Amino acid sequence: MSGLDFMAPLFVPANRPDRFGKAAASGADAVFLDLEDAVPPEAKQDARQSVHLYLGLSDHPVLVRINGMGTPWHRDDVALVSSLPIDGVVLPKAEIGSPMVRLAADLRRRLPIVALIETARGLRDAFEIAAFPGVMRLAFGSIDFCAELGCSHTREALLSARSGLVLASRLAGRVPPLDGVTTSIDDPDRVRDDARYARDLGFGGKLAIHPRQIGPICAGFRPDEGEIAWAQRVLRAGEGAVAVDGAMVDAPVRIRARSLLARAQRAQLR
């Protein structure tokens, strides 16, 4: 895994250090310590002071979701992340304009940014955000997005937004984006199915809000035995236009087969 190419990052409230050990042992390939939505206003300062307690608990990347510009906690959050040996910053409600420029300027060292697309304006700006210096990856804040638009949190309602983030990431040469959370934590089949749906749309991972979601998310993104066997048959068939399983195979199909096998190999390393 290189850069911010993780598959199942886990959000953990930074004001709950009692959960840090479980997060480190959850199997998540990254942890997002949350200073924003998961932390009530009266606990923001305690959360900021607790972030350092997680550092060193695992070898996986650690990022911090800061509070957005315009909130009373933003400046202190930026000062904190600038001083800690973390792997990146998660920026909520990312939109092109002064917040992006100010964040890049205020960070005292160059930290990779995961930009959460959670608003209509953010979706409109997604192509520019993905290409913005310092932004390494997009992520979909689907719950907030639905709340702002007043739409249902369904696949049909969010298909256009999801496809837009995948396309924006590809055109900017970024890692495929992270899909939004599944709110159910006691239905592994639903989490796995949602992850598989996101994978099929071109996402590279999915945000998790509970350790029990990590296994199902990884299973959803992992190619199954049938897909692996098909990819192997395609590559064994040789170059040029050939038939495999009664279907025409040419260069684009072989690219997909190689991608499936690479994803399967990557999943084995998790």
Image: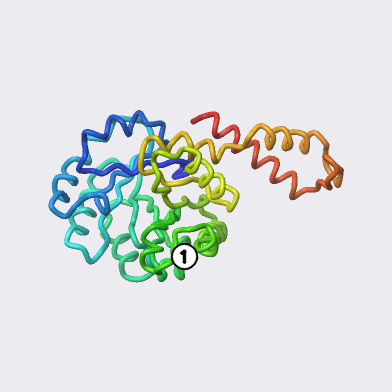
Q: Is residue 149 left or right of residue 236?
A: left
Give the residue type that dot 1 points to. Answer: Ala
Helix, strand or loop for disc 1: helix
Depth check, front residue: 241 or 233: 233
The colour style of the image is rainbow
173 over 213 or under it: above or below: below
User: Where 213 sits versus 155, above or below?
Assistant: above
Determine the residue positioned at 74% across, 44% down. Answer: 254
What is the number of callouts on the image? 1
Near-viewer residue (73 or 182): 182
Closest to the observer, 1 or 124 = 124
Residue 219, given in percent of the width and then of the height, sits at 53, 36
Q: Quadrant of residue 156?
A: bottom right
Q: How far across and how far down the image is residue 197, in percent?
A: 56, 49
In screen coordinates, is 209 left or right of 267? left
Q: Which residue lies under the disc numbered 1? A: 126
Residue in view at x 59 percent, y 38 percent: 263
Query: Relative to 66, is 236 on the left or the right?
Result: right
| Residue at the image point whose x is 31% and y is 66% from the top | 99
Residue 66 x, y percent position in the rendering: 27, 53
Horizontal side of residue 77 vs 133, given as left or right: left
Q: Nearer the viewer, residue 111 or 73?
A: 73
Residue 62, given in percent of the width and then of the height, sits at 34, 40
Residue under the image location 85 percent in, 43 percent down: 246
In the displayed structure, would residue 165 be above or below residue 88? below
The residue carrying pointer 1 sits among few (fewer than 14), some (14 to 19) or many (20 or more) residues within 10 Å by Cα, namely many
